[in-house]
Image: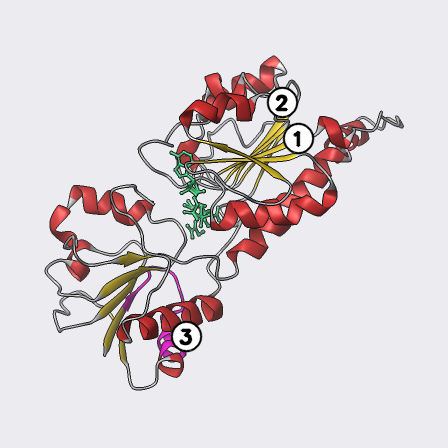
Amino acid sequence: MDIIFYHPTFDTQYWLKALLTALPGARVREWKRGDNQPADYALVWHPPVEMLQGRDLKAVFALGAGVDSILSKLKAHPDMLADNIPLFRLEDTGMGEQMQEYAVSQVLHWFRRFDDYQALKQQARWEPLTDYQREDFTIGILGAGVLGSKVAEALAPWGFPLRCWSRTRKDYPGITSFAGADELSPFLQGTRVLINLLPNTAETVGIINRGLLNQLADNSYVMNLARGVHLVEADLLKALESGKLKGAMLDVYSKEPLPPESPLWAHPRVAMTPHVAAVTRPAEAVSYIARTITHLEQGESVTGRVDRQRGY
Ligand SMILES: NC(=O)C1=CN([C@@H]2O[C@H](COP(=O)(O)OP(=O)(O)OC[C@H]3O[C@@H](n4cnc5c(N)ncnc54)[C@H](OP(=O)(O)O)[C@@H]3O)[C@@H](O)[C@H]2O)C=CC1
Ligand SMILES: O=C(O)C(=O)CO
């Protein structure tokens, strides 16, 4: 079995070695321009079109959870990957735990009003504030898949009212499920903390816009952990100015790296991280990919296949 690997920034040597250890007998190589030798599997992130074009692969694995960059490249170059070649993505592989840490710590930060106390500290003001009540702190998670459900699971023990929105209805204990476009408005009404974990698709791009933000509870919070294109940044800034939104925590941006002139940098009520909410953990990812390849080779069923029509 031949495996080709391409990632613009990862430590390729680590991956090649780990894949060889996990799949003894496989031949694993870094793909470099001009390499047209046969391969069975390709492991990729932001792949050059020529890496995949014309290849008769058994499967392609994206080295992340989101496949929007691969699918958008495929849209521009439809012959990059034949329709019958399955595309897989990483399911969790350690990203769930990172998203849990991120979301829980930020929700508690807002709930305990540390943002307000930080602002008071800047003015050297000693001022105990009224506590927020859990029942006024409904958390709504956009996207209830692998990562959204993990975040919900981590928030559940804290006792906040929890709800999620997805395409199909969920039956997660203690979490109210809203499904489909018709139930987006009821999901938003009363939501105080909105956490985005949707994939980037034609249906979800720009979804966090003025119309959506206006439906949230007053003094609400937005946490964007998915993709920058989900959020209309100008609408977020206006909602912060109008008082509709109290604060935002952003990990992803319409343009990355975020340009120095973006007004988000200086906004006192916008907290930011540089697209690090959950990163690919190599050891977990290698063992997940090796397990999936082994199952595929044995003709067994696997999960993680991307539905290219659906876009995630
Ligand atoms: N910031 C970061 O560091 C990282 C960001 N991400 C982002 O997180 C995203 C989510 O990852 P993951 O949880 O693994 O993905 P999943 O595919 O497991 O979950 C996606 C969820 O979104 C729902 N959904 C998709 N389209 C719609 C729609 N039109 N209307 C309503 N719900 C919809 C799905 O509904 P249903 O369940 O019904 O199919 C599903 O619940 C990734 O696509 C990626 O962009 C991922 C990793 C790191
Ligand atoms: O895996 C993904 O989709 C990511 O965004 C990694 O940062």
For residue 281, above or below residue 158: below
Q: Is mark 2 within 8 Å of ligand 1?
A: no
Task: Label 3: state its secondary structure.
Answer: helix
Q: Nearer the viewer, residue 166 or 204?
A: 166
Instruction: Give the left or right position of residue 150, taking residue 252 as reference.
Output: right
Residue positioned 89% across, 28% down in the render:
126
Q: Earlier in the sequence, mark 3 or mark 2?
A: 3
For residue 293, above or below residue 46: below
Residue positioned 52% across, 45% down in the render:
148
Q: Is residue 254 visible?
A: no
Q: How many other residues sit within 10 Å of disc 3, few (<14), some (14-19) or many (≥20)?
A: few
Residue at the disc numbered 3: 14
- Where does the image place residue 5, in percent across and percent down from the top left? 29, 68
For the N terminus, the image quarter is bottom left
Q: Earlier in the sequence, mark 1 or mark 3?
A: 3
Q: Amino acid at mark 3?
A: Tyr
The residue range painted magenta reads 5-19
Which is more foreground, mark 3 or mark 2? Answer: 2
Residue 190 got which mark? Answer: 2
For residue 41, above or below residue 160: below
- Report if the CB atoms under discs 2 and 1 are less than 8 Å apart: yes
Residue at the disc numbered 1: 138
Task: Label 2: state its secondary structure.
Answer: loop
Q: How many other residues sit within 10 Å of disc 1, few (<14), some (14-19) or many (≥20)?
A: many
Instruction: Give the left or right position of residue 78, taking residue 259 as reference.
Output: left
Q: Is residue 13 magenta?
A: yes
